Image (tube, rainbow, N blue to C red):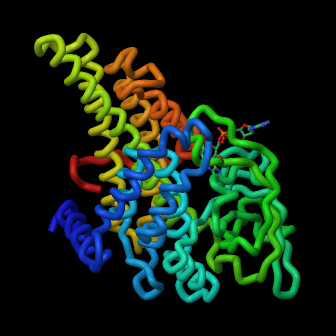
Amino acid sequence: MNVREAAARAVDEAQQVIFSQGPSLPERTSKVAATAAADAEAVDREARFPKAAFDVAREQKLLGIMIPVDFGGHSASIYDVTDVCYALGRACTSTAMIYAMHQTKVACIVRHGRGTPWLETMMRHVANDQWLLASSTTEGHNGGNIRSSAAAVGHSTDRISLLRDATVISYGAEADGLVTTARRADDAVSSDQVLLALARQDYSLRRTQGWETLGMRGTCSSGFELKVDCPADRVFPESYEKIHVQTMMPFAHLTWSSAWAGAAAAAVERAHRFIRKAARSSGGQMPPAAAHFTAAKRSLAKLRAVINANMDAFARHEHDERVLSSLDFQSSINLLKVEASELAVQTVMSAMRACGLSGYRNDGEFTIGRHLRDVLSAPIMINNDRILASVATATLMSSVPVSLRDE
Ligand SMILES: Cc1cc2nc3c(=O)[nH]c(=O)nc-3n(C[C@H](O)[C@H](O)[C@H](O)COP(=O)(O)OP(=O)(O)OC[C@H]3O[C@@H](n4cnc5c(N)ncnc54)[C@H](O)[C@@H]3O)c2cc1C
């Protein structure tokens, strides 16, 4: 069986398990997407959390799909989750990105939480109570340097504390729980990090900064002082270094890229409708900007291909620590984020050029403004320049493939 066949079989098997009763995953997803699409403009204009879409997502049990069946979920695969991200991205990028960030945190709990009573309790809450989990990695002026933490966990007998300058926590005010990185202890170096999974009663948030941004306005990614005081069992037993390499980064990059690809696809759909309408009204003659539509379709195809190639590579080795930690896999999954974010911007920009003034206007059926503003966040959400600088040495150390198909 080749990789494609194996991947297709994995998807088929997952679809059979997922929601064996009631509507299928795609049916449930389209209900959420329809609500998200109807609310997208108001969410963007008012910079508010897409509550209506998440109410439906909870009703449709979409928040807990990745939780294993024995903890009340549906054991969804990476293919299922990224399909949802893409579908939501076509409707509302903020909704898709919130879903993507939530699922990245859920993946950490699912893949590193089995056998740890508190993390198993969190799994049950996500599956049964549809808890929404936020993420805190950005701290102070440290930018997107996820592998470094300033605030340290304070330890007393059976409790821990943490005081963190969390510069950005998307939907922090709306979430039922939070997953945060932290320095292991006062005497640990900044890269010696742990991951904490917290329920709402374990922490308090004091807003320190708003979220008045160009795009992604519905993620409501305000800054907070995060104050934690909770039982000591909230700390993952494995080091963050390991979780980062095996789970956090692969899931973040695959789900984010899928959300951006969805936004790019929505812009291409608008350009498609525009070009057809323009051609029809001029007796079948293509408008001069039609070449930009072709460019948009080409870059969308590349974007989908690069996501799928990385997803297949991840799915093939998802339980193989050695492969996931290898230079080749790490460089590739890091570069996926860079490549996907640049292609998403390029695709939406080409779609806008194809639509001309109709795309540039903020009103009308062909407006691309929101998509462009949203997708411009992609290259800076963990800045591409930072990623490129950090993978430079690894790229130099990995060999150049000698044949077309070999890994
Ligand atoms: C839509 C969106 C949602 C996000 N959601 C979350 C989230 O839920 N949780 C989370 O933890 N992070 C979140 N982030 C932040 C993200 O993870 C990265 O930390 C961020 O995108 C890095 O941006 P940057 O370009 O400023 O940082 P980098 O390019 O990584 O670094 C910028 C550098 O500039 C300097 N610098 C930055 N700001 C200042 C300043 N004010 N004064 C002086 N020097 C400064 C620092 O040296 C810093 O290292 C989100 C980002 C986006 C775009």
Q: Taking the image as drawn, is residue 335 in sight? A: no
Q: Where, quadrant-wise, is the C terminus in this rendering?
A: bottom left
- Residue visible at 36% across and 31% down in the picture: 347
| In the image, residue 342 above or below residue 106 | above
Q: Where, quadrant-wise, is the N terminus in this rendering?
A: bottom left
Percent across and percent down for residue 355 are 33, 20
Q: Residue furthest left?
A: 283
Q: Taking the image as drawn, is residue 272 in sight? A: yes
Report the image quarter containing ligand 1: top right
| In the image, residue 29 above or below residue 286 | below
Count of numbered marks: 0
- Residue visible at 50% across and 69% down in the picture: 107
Q: Nearer the viewer, residue 157 or 281?
A: 281
| In the image, residue 276 above or below residue 26 | above
Q: Nearer the viewer, residue 183 or 395?
A: 183
Q: Nearer the viewer, residue 403 or 340?
A: 340
- Residue visible at 62% across and 65% down in the picture: 241
- Which image quadrant is residue 68 in? bottom left
Percent across and percent down for residue 303 are 34, 41
Drawn side of residue 363 relative to residue 248, left or right: left
Percent across and percent down for residue 274 are 27, 24
Drawn side of residue 304 relative to residue 250, left or right: left
Drawn side of residue 352 relative to residue 374, left or right: left
Percent across and percent down for residue 152 are 81, 65
- Residue visible at 28% across and 69% down in the picture: 24
Drawn side of residue 194 relative to residue 157, left or right: left
